[in-house]
Image (cartoon, grey):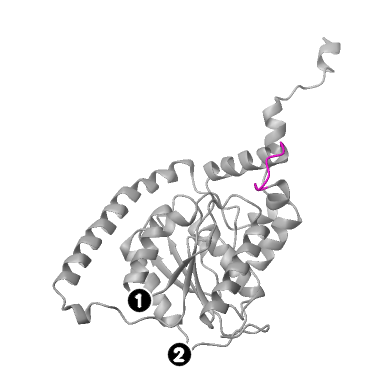
Amino acid sequence: MARISHLPVLRPRNVVQMSTSTLASFLLPEGYARPALVAVAREASLVTEVGRYALRSVEDRRTRRSTPYTGRGPVRAADPVILVPGFMAGDASLAFMARALRAQGYRTYRSMIRANIGCTLDAAAQLESRLESIAIRRGTRVQVVGHSLGGMLARGVAVRRPDLVSGIITMGSPMLAPGAHHRALTAGVDVLVRLSRAGVPGLMSEECVAGSCARQSFDESRSPLPYGVDFTAIYSKRDGIVDWRACIDPAAHAIEVRASHVGMAVDPRVIDHVVGSLRRQAQPASVEVDRGITA
């Protein structure tokens, strides 16, 4: 019996693999928590939110038809707007919002992110390059609307390049605790890390969730915003994916909505808040872009 008691304890391989891909502890600071397992059920309201968008679209078409042709075109907004998708999503996830913003006179641009599943620093660099391109073309700074991880990317770029960004609007972006998300999301991160470890290129690696890459992204998303960059943070206590408390940045003008995490991208009530924030944050005139970039 003594010999048996000294035998090494065998652990399943999958348990060891999970421990090597766990998110860094600093991504989940004290005071924040992952949503309960059943919280994801709240995301079922996405069906209602899509339906609400469809009804609003029908009403808008009726209004346009009853309006004289000369009065149909909205006044063109000064600042262009770029929309940045959340984790594991692409530009298509914000197509409904982009259409609604264009109807309000905003010139919208895609981030050119097909699927937000790669290194966050690489995604931020891609976003920065895209912003430079838009700024050169329009001769003005850009407003950035980011959903979830997209909002965190937007905040980091705004810290580094205030010459390109006039304002940011985040929707359900847990900047104060990126690790305060549902375990189903963590499972998705684990899959990407394992595939990256197996040699699949362009995916989130261990450095992105537990190394220096994760630390730099986290620090940038919490750094003070430069003067002249406005910030609105939209959050929902019905969010079934992230801890809503982590979405309320002290530096932001916080707006509470009643929507699911995914539904924030399509719910017309949220879109109304986005439009209102864009108008509030709009600069009175185009601002010349620094670093040698001019109109």
Residue 21 magenta? no
Q: Quadrant of residue 161?
A: bottom right
What residue is drawn where x is 76% and y is 57%?
212
Mark 2 residue crowding within 10 angstroms, few (<14) / some (14–19) / many (20+): few
**What's the amino acid at mark 1?**
Gly
Q: Position of residue 146 (x, y in %)?
A: 50, 64
Q: Position of residue 113 (x, y in %)?
A: 54, 57
Location of residue 115 with respect to 281 vertically, above or below: above
Between marks 1 and 2, how big is the CA–CA gap?
16 Å
Q: Is residue 264 left or right of residue 180?
A: left
For the record, the magenta segment spans: 198-204
Q: Which residue is mark 2?
A: 284
Which of labels 1 and 2 is toward the front? 1
Q: Quadrant of residue 157?
A: bottom right
**What's the amino acid at mark 2?**
Pro
Q: Is residue 256 left or right of residue 49?
A: right
Q: Which residue is at the far bottom? A: 285
Q: Which residue is at the far top? A: 1
Q: Position of residue 13 (x, y in %)?
A: 71, 26
Q: Position of residue 1 (x, y in %)?
A: 82, 9
